[in-house]
Each structure stands twice: as C-alpha cells, then as structure tokens.
Image: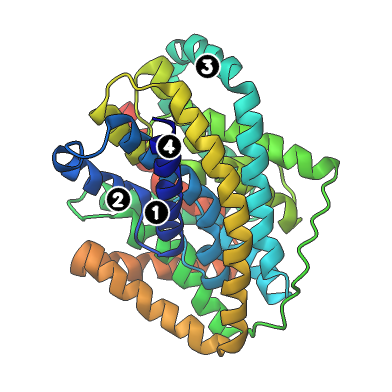
Amino acid sequence: MFLEIILAIALGTLAGIFTGLIPGIHVNLVSTILLGLSGFLLKYVPLYSLLVFIVSMAITHTFIDTIPSIFLGAPDGATALSVLPGHRLLLEGEGLKAVMLTVVGSLFGLLLSLILYFVFEQIIGFVYPLIKNFIGYILIFFGFFMIYKSENKFRALVLFAFSGYLGFIVLNSNTQNSLFPLLSGFFGISTLLFSLNSKSKIPLQNKDFNIKLNKSSFVSIFLGVFSGFFTAFFPGLGASTAAAVSSTIREDSEPKNFLLMIGAISTVNFFMSLAALSVLGKARNGAIIAVMTLQEIPNIFLLIIACVLAGGLSVLIAIRVSKKFLLVMEKINYELVVKFVIVFLFVICYILSGFTGIIILIISSAIGYYANWKGIPRNIMMACILVPVISFFLF
C-alpha cells in the first residue's frame, strides 16, 4: 500500500506539471476524464491510489500554473490576476523571481494551512450555517467595495457592469469550458496586445531568485491564507475572485507581496476544499467533485498527506522548470513569442469552446484592453465570476 501511494503521488505530481504548463489543459478537465475512465481504471488500480493521484495533481497544478501566466501571459482561473505584476517583473528582468515568489507563497500557504487545518475545520462547521443564507449579500458588498476603492469610480463601475454582464451571459450559456475564453481575454490577450503596442522587449533576465521576506511579505501571505480559507464558505468563489477582493482590501503597489499572496491563495483554496468536503460534504472544485463521486467519504488524512508531499516535490520541480522556461524565452524574439501565444490561445479556445468561444475571447480581450488603457484596476473584471455567483444565490 505504501509504495502504491508514493507512486500515485509521483504520477499525480507529473500530471500536475503537465496541466500547469499547458494553457487550457486544466485539472478539472483531466479529473473529469479520469472519472469517465474510472470503471476501467479501478479494475487495475486501488481506489485510494486514484484519489491520491487526483489530489496530488491538483495541488501540484497550483504551484506550477503561474509559469505560463508570467512568462507567456496565458492565465487560467486561479492565476488570472498574477499576469500583470508578473509581466511587469518579467519586463524588468525579474521573471524568474516573479515565478518563485508565487511558489514561496504557495509553500507557506500549504504549511500554514496544514498547521491550522483542524482549527479551520471547526470554524467552517460553526460559521457556514450562520452565513449561508447571506452569501449573496456579502458578495454584493465586496463588489461595491472594489468599486469604491478605485480611483475613478465611474470607470470602475462601467467596467464592473460590462464584465459582470458578459460573465453572466457566458457562464449561463451552453459554451463548453466557458471560463477559458473569458479569462484568457480579460487577463491574457489584452495584456499581450498592450505589451505589443508599447513595444515591450524582454531584457536579459536575472538568474538570481534570492527572495527576502519581511513583515509586509508575511502579512501578504497570511492574507492569502485567510482569503483561500474564505473561499471554502462560498461555492463558485474561486482563487482569482478571492485575490481580487484581497488586493482591494490591502492596497500594496509592491508586486512581490501581491505575487506571494496570489501563490498562497491558489494553494490554500484547493487545500481548504478538503476541509469543506470533510465538514460540509460539499465539493468546491472539479478535482474534489471527482474525489467525492468516486468515494463519498474519502480518507481525508491520506489526502492531506498526499497534498503535503506533492507540494514539497512541486517546489523543487518549479525551480528547475522555471529555469528551463527562462532559457528558452531568452533565445526567442519576444514579439514573436507574444504573437505566437495570442494565436495559440485562439486555437486552444476554438478547440475547447468552438466558434462561440472565439467571440467571447474577442469581446473579453477588448474589455481587458480598455482596462489597461485607462488604468482601471483589473481586479474589477473578476465581476465576470462575482456577478453570476451573486445571481445564483439571490435569484
């Protein structure tokens, strides 16, 4: 049994590297495929090994997925907001440091979540019944708070309205993998187009990623941990939305602190979904839905161990993969890379979401470009998820 678990963790980690590095190939997609093949797989693989594989893949994904976000500007749902500060550091020659900041944030987030796990379980069990009927109103408050904190409130309100309306239409449509074109347009292609128009070039990158943490850094990490934990209460409220709210609450122009927070949120968001499963019997993401479908009451302790071991491996792997990525980036013309990534995102979008996805991608890219052009905080565009979730609870 021990060797089977170790093998499942190792294979799950490798799968998480694959899903993290390839835009459009998300953990939820792979988990759904595995669920469909489970009848065949369980003839040869013990159930606990399959569960460990899925959880190891999902936690590894949270450590690796910022690499394409920062180096290529190709985000997924959890890393959308990391693109701008990460891209800024990349253009300053600190791309490797940007990636490692998110990895350090993920590592501290995982360790703090482990330490506080049983405390968080008790809080979830006590607080969730008290607030579950008010979740929609709480989210409305956060939406207005994000607008209020913006320098130009009218433009922020307009951006919130357009993003929210588009998100509501798209997420309530029959479009497959609808989040991919939505977020790739808002936070990926719009940033890349803006970069092209400003004639940005990748300078020689600093290979030293010595990261010094101070009091402000740890405040950001702790905020990331509690924001990730916060999502355990709210169905449909993922890591990116939590990051948008957190970045509004704590205004910090330092990219380092923001990336630390993003890394922590992404990992804690998944890790705390185990607590939500354990206490509430509810799934908060595709990987946990697959786990819950395969076994309604899984061995949570085993899954926690898998997360910790896979997370430790992911730190070492992220360092090596980031360096390899950087070597490739330095040898290729940046403008050519940007154009290739834009075309690549359109192709993946068509494969995953069809012609409708292309239309969504174009519209969301235009809105995202407007936000860049006018200097509106881009976390406002997370209204594309916030508004549909609010409508779910209130209507």
Q: Quadrant of residue 122?
A: top right
Query: Residue 37 location in percent, x, y?
Result: 17, 45
Lower position in the chain sequence, tag 4 or tag 2: 4
Going by the numbered disc 4, the residue's amino acid type is Leu
How dense is the environment of label 2, judged by Cα within 10 Å: few (below 14), some, or many (20 and up)? many
Query: Residue 260 location in percent, x, y?
Result: 68, 49
Pointers 3 and 4 in contact (CB under 8 A)? no
- Where does label 2 land, which residue? 30
Lower position in the chain sequence, tag 3 or tag 4: 4
- Where does label 4 land, which residue? 3
Lower position in the chain sequence, tag 2 or tag 1: 1
Say which of marks 3 and 4 sits in front.
4
Front-most of residues 206 and 177: 206
Pointers 1 and 4 in contact (CB under 8 A)? no
- Where does label 3 land, which residue? 121
Coloured how? rainbow
Q: Residue at x 78, y 45 (%)?
A: 217
Q: Residue at x 57, y 57 (%)?
A: 317
Pointers 2 and 1 in contact (CB under 8 A)? yes
Cα separation between marks 4 and 2: 24 Å
Going by the numbered disc 2, the residue's amino acid type is Val
Residue 97, numbered label: none
Cα separation between marks 1 and 4: 18 Å
Going by the numbered disc 1, the residue's amino acid type is Ala
Cα separation between marks 3 and 1: 29 Å
Q: Residue at x 70, y 40 (%)?
A: 221
Q: Is residue 37 above or below residue 132?
A: below
Lower position in the chain sequence, tag 3 or tag 1: 1
- Where does label 1 land, which residue? 15
